[in-house]
Structure formats: C-alpha cells, structure tokens
C-alpha cells in the first residue's frame, strides 16, 4: 500500500501565478482533505472532498479551489499567488464513515517569490 | 467550534526521562482526539487516537495518552525518551459525527531530547 502520495514535493512560483497540487489517497479511502501548514504553525484546514463535491471548507479565500476525480484523487488549485501562500500543503485521506483516522501525505512545499 | 491548546511550544528532556506533552481541548460535542508526530520536512504520522472507547490510549513507539473529560485534557506521555523521539508533536480534535470531519490542530510542541 503506497499510502497517501502527493506531487510535486517542492515547487517555486512567482506572485500572481497559479499552481496545482495533486494527491492520491490511501487505498480504500474515499475522502480527501487539504491542509496548509505555515512555517512554525499547526496545519490549517482548507477543504474536504467526498463524492467529487466540496463537503466542508475552512477560512480560506476563493483563490483556493479544489477538485476530486472519480478515482478519489484530488487537486488543490491556488490562483493569484501571494507571498503568504508559501507553506507546506498537506493532503489527508480517510473513509467517509466511521472512526478511522486521517492518513497524511508527505506534503508539497510551495514557495512563492 | 472546536479547538485545542498545546501548553509549551518547546519541551526538552534528557534521554531516558519521562516525556509529558500537554493538550487541552474545547468541544461542544463529544470529541475525537489525536496526537500526530512530524519529523523535519515530512508529513504527519498518527501516534494514537481517542474515539470514545477506553480513556487510556496506547499508541506507537511507546507513547500513550489519557482522556480526562473533567479536565478537558489529552496529555501525551512516554516513560523513557529516546533520541529518535525528537520531533514536532501536534494534538488535534475532530467532531464525532460518524462521517469524516475536519481536524483542528494545536500549534505544536517541539520535543528536544538531550544526552
């Protein structure tokens, strides 16, 4: 089992650009959540996808959007990048029902210059 | 709204000493509680979880935590620290709705283990 995989591992973008991050969930998981972890902080919830729909959303602007595909994989898109968007972006997968915990990927380190 | 507070952003212990990392939660519904560990430049790994079964929860690598409702606490302990335990530790809470719920994390505690 490959667990949760994210790509790319590192990315450097310029202010104003757009970026797409990708996540493949752990086998058997149908729910994907995205988190932003700024340097020295705890992860902050961005949004969650199940059945290709956004189910919950944290306090992030509309510049942050996502998508889930029929195979449960997911993308996080960020438009009009700001310097403050520099962070580690973590993807977590879990089953939609039950008490199972979320499994995290290694993250994508985004640097905006 | 749910939240967790981790007391102490940095904790330093000697190898072989007791590890105690503190976490207090706030939740209007029965919570699920988690401890995750993060090594440098890596994602989060689950250490243990509380989901309303036994109040004393045993996890990986010798860690355990006790859910105390009266104190709204879920402190993480390990009897004897090892150098490999040096990492960032996060306490997190989610709601027990029966479906996948977002995690709300604390600000983290960096554990340093010295010789």
Image (cartoon, rainbow, N blue to C red):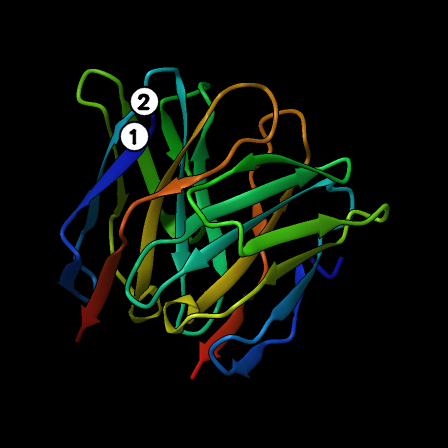
Q: Residue at x 50, y 36 (%)?
A: B102
Viewer-proximal residue, B5 or B88?
Answer: B5
Residue B27 falls left or right of residue B14: right
Q: Which mark is drawn over residue B66? A: 1
Residue A23 falls left or right of residue A89: right
Same chain for labels 1 and 2? Say yes or no.
yes
- Going from the N terminus, do you reach mark 1 or mark 2 first? 2
Q: Residue under circle 2?
A: B27
Residue B26 falls left or right of residue A106: left
Of labels 1 and 2, the one closer to you: 2
Q: Quadrant of residue A76?
A: bottom right
Q: Secondary structure at mark 2?
A: loop
Q: Position of residue B86 (x, y in %)?
A: 30, 67
Q: Position of residue B12 (x, y in %)?
A: 14, 64
Q: Are marks 1 and 2 in contact (CB under 8 Å)?
A: no
Q: Secondary structure at mark 1?
A: strand
């Amino acid at each position: 089992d490959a667990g949760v995989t994210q790509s790319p591992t590192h990315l450097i973008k310029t202010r104003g650009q757009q970026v797409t991050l990708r996540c493949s969930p752990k086998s058997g998981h149908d729910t994907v959540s995205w988190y932003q972890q700024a340097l020295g902080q705890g992860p902050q919830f961005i949004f969650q996808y199940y059945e290709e729909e956004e189910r919950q959303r944290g306090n992030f602007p509309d510049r942050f959007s996502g998508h889930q595909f029929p195979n449960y994989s997911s993308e996080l898109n960020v438009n009009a990048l700001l310097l403050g968007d520099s962070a580690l972006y973590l993807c977590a997968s879990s089953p939609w029902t039950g008490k199972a915990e979320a499994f995290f990927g290694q993250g994508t380190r985004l640097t905006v210059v | 709204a749910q939240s967790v507070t981790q007391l102490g952003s940095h904790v330093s212990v000697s190898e072989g000493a007791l590890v105690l990392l503190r976490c207090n939660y706030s939740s209007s519904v029965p919570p699920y509680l988690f401890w995750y560990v993060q090594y440098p430049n890596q994602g989060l790994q689950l250490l243990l979880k509380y989901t309303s079964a036994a109040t004393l929860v045993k996890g990986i690598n010798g860690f355990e935590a006790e859910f105390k409702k009266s104190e709204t606490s879920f402190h993480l302990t390990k009897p004897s620290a090892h150098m490999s335990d040096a990492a960032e530790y996060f306490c997190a809470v989610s709601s027990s709705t029966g479906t996948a719920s977002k995690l709300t994390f604390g600000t983290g505690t960096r554990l340093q283990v010295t010789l």
